[in-house]
Amino acid sequence: MRISAITIYPVKSLAGNQVAEAEVTGTGFRNDRSWMIVGDDGIFITQRQHPALALVQAELTANGIRLTVPGREPMEIAARDDGDRVPVEVWEQPCDAADQGDDAASLFSEYLGRDCRLVRMHAGFRRRIKPKYYTGDEASLSFADSMPFLLISEASLDELNGRLDEPLPMNRFRPNLVVAGGAAYQEDRWHRIRVGSILMRVVKSCIRCEMTTIDQATAAKGIEPLETLGTYRSGAKGVLFGRHLLHESLGVIHLGDEVEVIE
């Protein structure tokens, strides 16, 4: 099998950038899910509350990100990762962030019709992975839900699409690693893999939420794929699709790198 897509999501719940290579740092891919939108209470905001966020494009630049909101001119935001610490919260986990300024806050507040801010993980803060998944001191996390990496096989999506009236693109599931070759749901049986030169441990299956039902091109919300997945991919806590990974080494992953199953 080989890596067929590498995606970086610069802002939580916004569009991702497919890249030819990506550096693996302590928190995962550099710049992946390093920015986040929060309400005036500091709690993260996603497409779950505001499906219209699917229509916002976030493109990485040399100094930060370029945001394109429907009906408005693109805005470039220079990344701030130090300065005053702002308390924010991701899945009831407190984090320290750096506010990204009033221009970005006004852009999103006007678009969503509520007070909100754009923040970036503070340079001096380390968000620990929950102990039930990892007990070491080395690994930390950006604003991702629970793990640095989400991997899905193209074969798994092909199998699902064979059951649907209308096939869905991979962006419904927001993986940052996609594998070509092999069998559907082969990733369910993996425990440790090597992606290029990077060792990774397969930690758990991804429990899918209502965000998978939001069309990323139109922001329309439906019932698929959760309705169909629920008939044959249900676990104790919900519908399962894709696998969460934790890296055991640093380096660079390239498009086309071989995926070796170690155990």
Image (spheres, rainbow, N blue to C red):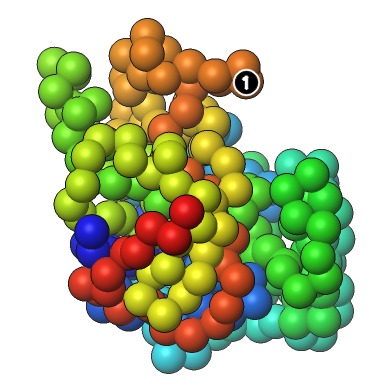
Q: Secondary structure at mark 1?
A: loop
Quadrant assignment for the N terminus? bottom left
Let me know if residue 12 appears in the view: no
Q: Residue at x 20, y 29 (%)?
A: 159
230 shown above or below 128: above
- Amino acid type, callout 1: Lys
Residue 161: x, y in percent? 18, 27
- Residue 154 is left or right of residue 28, and the answer is left
**Residue 240: % across, % down:** 47, 28
Q: Residues within 10 Å of mark 1 (few under 14, many from 20)?
A: few
Nearer-the-camera pick, 29 or 35: 29
The residue drawn where x is 44% and y is 60% is 262
Q: Residue lying farthest top?
A: 231
Residue 86 left/right relative to 201: right
Indicate the quadrant where residue 105 lies: bottom right
The one nearer the camera, 99 or 3, is 3
Residue 97 found in image quarter? bottom right
Q: Is residue 39 above or below residue 26?
A: above
User: In the orientation shown, which residue stands out farthest toward the bottom?
Assistant: 62
Taking depth in this image into account, of 194 and 22 the one nearest to the observer is 194
Report whether 37 appears left or right of 51: right
Q: Position of residue 88 (x, y in %)?
A: 80, 56
Residue at the disc numbered 1: 237
Measuring from the top left, give residue 47's x and y in whole percent. Answer: 50, 39
Q: How many marks?
A: 1
Q: Residue at x 13, y 16 (%)?
A: 165
Hey, which residue is sitting farthest front in the picture?
263
Q: Residue 147: in sight, yes or no?
A: yes
Q: In the picture provided, is 234 more to the left or to the right than 224?
A: right
Residue beneath the point at 82% across and 70% down:
137
